[in-house]
């Protein structure tokens, strides 16, 4: 959910609205904001499932340090979505272990 | 080609920018690297007003301090290189940086590491579930990107970060289910706790998270009271339906670069490089400033940044000895002011402080529940002159380094004295005009203007208010006491805003005069959407 | 790291604890019990635990778990670990793609 | 003066060589004390190397030792140590990048054939058939089937753990500074902290440090130190398991994909031959970029993989690039296993077995004479 009005911050600097896909689903966000923020605003919590225990992980530190929020972005795995700026048409996928769902099931 | 600079600063937060500005003003050729898209470090997430005195930029919100620093840096001609990831600090003070999709090598005659701190974490069952986040993450989401971290949140940690972020969550429109801490005492400033508690957020000290529940994301959390070994006591479990658990359990210096470079490391609230009085590490010409040298507030970081810059300038002949001494001493004086009082580093973790420097008994209710009782407050005879008519009532009962209230009152009603960790006092016989500057300027939101008897059976209370929707004069709502409990009906008399208040509204409410000493917050009839 | 340690002491048997299955290293999914057990198997330094179990060897390079691992090892050994003996710090401070790393500016 | 501790064998160095020697000696019933100047077990090359377990690409005198290791030790080492060493006999591909370097591959094939080690020469196309990721600039390759890799961290610590289980005593963070000859025999080891250790056998398994220590009893080895650097990438899908090396200008580059999914790569930038520091092995600014370029030349498909950690280590480079192993006959009681010149990991366990056998007066599994300390003579 986005904050519509804030008592201290007059505006949040945002780029233009862009479309991207998350596991094939079309979502919108703002250009330049971190991918993870756009996903969180859209209610997406799970970014990946871990390699060993297959447990869900999402955003944790939000500043690119903990690497828990990594996903597959435009085919590249282990992309820290909390610091990677959103672009029009990005293809964002849940990461399973080190790879996409299809690869993980092979 | 390897590019050489007189000074390379790593980190464009308060310490790094202050260092760069000072060094550039000394004539050094400086570059600042920061991995973020925007400079300012954590300052742009700090939407609250800072403590300290005028020279520490007190009563100014962190975000504005960030803006001021950026303007100063630009004026001083500092080269700030953003989106620049420093890969490492190598031999010969070599700094390799990734920017513009390539790697560039630099060497600094001096290097100042000002990489700040990272958040500590505490593991509990379910702590890897999406929805368990760091307090810094919550700040990043809501204050930088305008995204709500969650709808209903449990805050773990009552240090200043936990308290400040809890308040910010409320401002962002989230609900804070509770603030908990394994420690028996609130760790942060009492005034920060009080402003959260009076909105109705319960505090659970000596409590820990037993479990964050939920499969793919958090759906609830169970906490329990802990014994003296911090082990949960069976049977004391409490459950909250929350979608987010937020951790604010301390910070650790991000000292990896200095460790990599081979600086001698010591333990000081986490591993930090050993340093001399100018912040110079065991490697000549490699300095540290800000949290990376030891966790403090942003106001201290700015000063330690300037000190490190002076050290570098002195080392490389950019400043005369006389000028160096003069400026260094001024910095040390300024820093020492902030390093006084019961919250200073030497007192960290102490639970045996029972009185203020002045000898007033500390409020135990404040330390365990987040708010003061009227009986406890009454003992602070300095805080309320009990005059007739409008007058300030100050609820600032701990020795924290802060004095904007004294500065704010042009009529001499409030006195802190020269030592800024003194408790403020309301000057007897002084004449309050009701201007409200003290209310608006108090970074702790701990000053109220009270008129105990307006002559018609009512009292008016002017309180600082930073929530939406903006109350309208004439509307009716509920007055809450310090613990956030409803005490009576309240009518909004006036809402004052002013550019100099910087978004703090002065909300004057009217309550039956019996509640004059109790009503400290206002809740609109209908919850703000 | 040069801290003196005569490793002939006996730590006693490894006794399982209730919270042994807590994940400590989020990246490599290493539990508290695994770390405690490693100490009992002779891994008496942060570096040995790391090399033995991979704690702190994942994407985030121990930036999240370092302090936790240190506490567990300290508790198990009943001995303080010096700041010098904590995990090493190595470049790159953030993950860098090889094609970027290999491209040095003129 | 500190206390005196006695054992049948005192080993200097807790790495793969020292710990293996201690383990195999303890297995024979000897009491062993291992000393290390570092506070961390195996903190030298054993924990910094690429993990190659190879026969090919070695110098002739060490081939019998390597072959014995690959045939008789590594296949069962995981069971022996009760730890997964991640040993895989997955082959070694050695690349050439120019036409001029192809004869070097042929020479390797020929030399190994003399020891019964089969090496297959591949054209660039054949190499790509084996592994589709092989880059376009490759001109040919040599393939050795019995080569492979293992996890050096787990193997070294596994050896330490196994040795400790068998009663080996380890003391770390105290440097051996002197060996004393007592009644004509090397018996005592004096440490920086003033501790004294006495044993029938003193084993120098401390890399370059062996030289200074041997000097205290009038023995010298022609060793020098060279810096070497590696990095590891993020894990990715399994791509290929074999070890990779090269001949010619790219000869310093090597690596493989680990069981964890990450890639390990090492290589040169030129600075490591003459680093400006001598104590802790530190990375040099230019080296990781150089290794990145080297790796991408081998396998362009790895270009987007992220490097997450770089490190450096010292190798104990011997004058003739292969180790000095065995008893030092001039000084009875003294044994050495050092100067591995970056070949120590694969040879560590077998060296330990060999030295334990020598110490026990048994016939060693491999003849150490070609590797003896007194082999250095003028080539004229």
Image: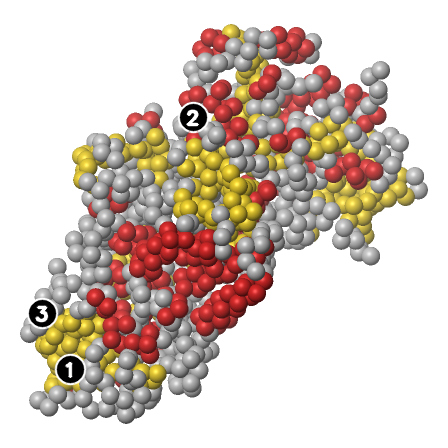
Residue B212, image quadrant: bottom left
Contact between labelled residues 1 and 2, with CB atoms less than 8 Å apart: no
Identify the residue under disc 1: B460
Residue C72 in picture, x, y percent from top left: 51, 54
Residue projecting furthest to the left: B474
Q: Up-down: is B514 above or below D103?
A: below
Is A33 situated above or below D100? below
| Residue B371 in view, yes or no | no
Gap between marks 2 and 3 measured at Cα: 61 Å
Above or below D131: residue B295: below
Q: Tell me if mark 2 has few (under 14), some (14-19) or many (20+) residues whose alpha carbon lies within 10 angstroms of its own.
A: some
Residue D68: image x %, image y %? 68, 21
Classify mark 3: helix, strand or loop.
loop
Residue B476 sits in which quadrant? bottom left
- B372 relative position to B280: left or right: left
Judge the density around disc 1: few (<14), some (14-19), many (≥20) Cα neighbours within 10 Å. Answer: many
- Nearer the observer: mark 2 or 3; the answer is 3
**Going 42% across and 85% down the picture, which residue do you hit?**
B358
Residue ID at (78%, 52%): D195
Residue at label 3? B472
User: What is the spatial separation of the Cα atoms under label 3 and label 1, in whole angstroms?
Assistant: 16 Å
Residue displayed at 23% across by 48% down: A13
Q: Chain of mark 1?
A: B
* Badge 2 and badge 1 in a common chain: no
Per the model, the C-alpha gap separating discs 2 and 1 is 69 Å
Residue underneath mark 2: D303
């Amino acid at each position: 959910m986005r904050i519509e009005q804030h008592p201290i911050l007059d505006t949040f600097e945002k780029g233009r609205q862009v479309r991207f896909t998350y596991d094939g689903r079309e979502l919108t966000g703002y250009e330049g904001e971190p991918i993870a923020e756009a996903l969180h605003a859209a209610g997406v919590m799970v970014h990946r499932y871990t390699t060993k225990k297959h447990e869900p992980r999402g955003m944790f530190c939000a500043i690119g340090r903990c690497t828990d929020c990594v996903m597959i972005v435009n085919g590249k795995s282990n992309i820290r979505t909390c610091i990677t700026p959103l672009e029009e048409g990005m293809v964002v996928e849940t990461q399973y272990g080190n790879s996409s769902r299809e690869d993980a099931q092979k | 080609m390897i590019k050489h600079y007189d000074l390379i600063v790593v980190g464009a937060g308060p310490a790094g920018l202050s260092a760069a500005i000072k060094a550039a003003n000394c004539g050094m050729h400086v570059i600042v690297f920061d991995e973020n898209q925007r400079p300012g470090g954590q300052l742009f997430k700090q939407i609250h007003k800072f403590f300290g005195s005028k020279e520490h930029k007190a009563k100014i919100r962190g975000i504005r301090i960030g803006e001021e620093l950026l303007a100063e840096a630009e004026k001083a001609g500092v080269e700030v290189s953003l989106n620049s990831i420093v890969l490492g600090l190598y031999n010969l003070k070599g700094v390799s940086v990734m920017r513009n999709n390539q790697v560039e090598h630099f060497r600094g005659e001096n290097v100042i590491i000002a990489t700040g701190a990272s958040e500590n974490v505490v593991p509990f069952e379910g702590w890897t579930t999406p929805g368990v986040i760091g307090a810094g993450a919550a700040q990043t989401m809501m204050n930088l990107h305008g995204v709500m971290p969650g709808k209903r949140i449990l805050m773990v940690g009552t240090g200043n970060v936990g308290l400040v972020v809890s308040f910010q969550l409320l401002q962002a429109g989230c609900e804070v289910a509770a603030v908990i801490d394994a420690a028996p005492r609130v760790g942060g400033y009492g005034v920060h706790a009080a402003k959260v508690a009076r909105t109705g957020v319960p505090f659970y000290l000596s409590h820990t998270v037993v479990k964050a529940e939920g499969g793919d994301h958090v759906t609830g959390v169970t906490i329990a009271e802990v014994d003296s070994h911090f082990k949960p006591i069976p049977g004391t479990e409490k459950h909250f339906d929350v979608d987010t658990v937020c951790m604010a359990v301390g910070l650790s210096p991000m000292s990896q670069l200095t460790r990599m470079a081979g600086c001698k490391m010591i333990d000081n609230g986490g591993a930090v490089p050993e340093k001399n009085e100018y912040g110079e590490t065991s490697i000549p010409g490699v300095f540290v400033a800000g949290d990376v040298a030891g966790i403090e507030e942003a106001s201290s970081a700015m000063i330690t940044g300037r000190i490190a810059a002076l050290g570098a300038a002195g080392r490389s002949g950019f400043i005369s000895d006389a000028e160096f001494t003069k400026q260094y001493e001024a910095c040390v004086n300024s820093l020492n002011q902030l390093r006084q009082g019961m919250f200073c580093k030497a007192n960290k973790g102490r639970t045996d402080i029972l009185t203020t420097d002045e000898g007033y008994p500390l409020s135990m209710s404040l330390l365990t529940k987040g708010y003061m009782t009227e009986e406890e407050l009454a003992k602070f005879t300095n805080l309320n002159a009990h005059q007739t008519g409008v007058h300030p009532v100050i609820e600032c009962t701990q020795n924290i380094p802060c004095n904007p209230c004294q500065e704010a009152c042009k009529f001499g009603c409030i006195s802190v004295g020269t030592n800024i960790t003194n408790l403020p006092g309301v000057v007897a016989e002084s004449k309050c005009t009701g201007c409200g500057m003290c209310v608006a300027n108090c970074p702790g939101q701990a000053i109220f203007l009270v008129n105990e008897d307006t002559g018609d059976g009512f009292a008016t209370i002017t309180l600082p208010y930073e929530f939406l929707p903006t109350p309208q004069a004439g509307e009716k709502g509920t007055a809450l006491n310090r613990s956030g409990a409803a005490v009576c009906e309240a009518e909004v008399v006036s809402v004052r805003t002013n550019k100099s208040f910087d978004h703090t509204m002065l909300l004057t409410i009217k309550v039956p005069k019996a509640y004059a000493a109790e009503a400290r917050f206002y809740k609109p009839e209908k919850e703000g959407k | 790291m040069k801290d003196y340690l005569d490793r002939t002491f006996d730590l006693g048997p490894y006794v399982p604890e209730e919270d042994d299955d807590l994940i400590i290293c989020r990246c490599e999914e290493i539990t508290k019990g695994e770390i405690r057990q490693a100490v009992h198997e002779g891994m008496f330094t942060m570096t040995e635990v790391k090399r033995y179990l991979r704690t702190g060897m994942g994407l985030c390079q121990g930036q999240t778990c370092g302090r936790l691992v240190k506490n567990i090892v300290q508790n198990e050994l009943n001995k303080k670990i010096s700041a010098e003996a904590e995990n090493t710090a190595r470049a790159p401070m953030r993950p860098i793609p090889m094609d970027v790393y290999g491209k040095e500016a003129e | 003066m500190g206390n005196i501790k006695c054992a049948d064998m005192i080993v200097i160095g807790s790495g793969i060589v020292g710990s293996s020697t201690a383990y195999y000696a303890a297995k024979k019933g000897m009491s062993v004390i291992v000393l290390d100047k570092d506070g961390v077990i195996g903190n030298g090359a054993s924990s910094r190397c690429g993990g190659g377990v190879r026969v090919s690409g070695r110098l002739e005198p060490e081939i019998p030792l390597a072959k014995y290791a690959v045939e008789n030790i590594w296949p069962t080492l995981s069971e022996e140590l009760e730890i997964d060493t991640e040993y895989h006999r997955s082959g070694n591909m050695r690349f050439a990048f120019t036409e001029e370097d192809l004869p070097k591959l042929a020479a390797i094939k020929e030399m190994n054939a003399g020891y019964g080690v089969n090496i297959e020469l591949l054209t660039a196309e054949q190499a790509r058939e084996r592994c589709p990721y092989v880059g376009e600039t490759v001109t040919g390759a040599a393939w050795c089937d019995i080569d492979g890799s293992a996890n050096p961290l787990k193997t070294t610590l596994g050896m330490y753990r196994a040795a400790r289980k068998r009663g080996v005593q380890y003391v770390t963070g105290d440097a051996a500074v002197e060996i004393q000859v007592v009644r004509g025999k090397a018996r005592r080891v004096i440490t920086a902290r003033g501790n004294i250790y006495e044993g029938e056998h003193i084993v120098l398994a401390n890399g370059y440090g062996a030289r200074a220590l041997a000097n205290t009893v009038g023995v010298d080895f022609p060793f020098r130190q060279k810096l070497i650097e590696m990095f590891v990438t993020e894990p990715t899908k399994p791509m290929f398991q074999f070890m990779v090396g090269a001949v010619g200008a790219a000869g310093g580059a090597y690596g493989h994909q680990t069981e964890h999914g990450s890639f390990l790569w090492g290589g040169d930038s030129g600075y490591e031959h003459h680093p400006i520091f001598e104590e802790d092995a530190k990375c040099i600014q230019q080296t990781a970029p150089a290794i990145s370029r080297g790796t991408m030349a081998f396998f362009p498909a790895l270009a987007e993989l992220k490097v997450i950690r770089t490190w450096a280590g010292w190798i104990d480079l011997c004058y003739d690039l292969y180790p000095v192993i065995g008893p030092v006959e001039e000084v009875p009681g003294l044994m050495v296993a050092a100067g591995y010149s970056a070949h120590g990991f694969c040879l560590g366990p077998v060296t330990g077995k060999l030295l334990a056998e020598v110490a026990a007066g048994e016939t060693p599994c491999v003849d150490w004479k070609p590797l003896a300390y007194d082999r250095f003579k003028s080539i004229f």
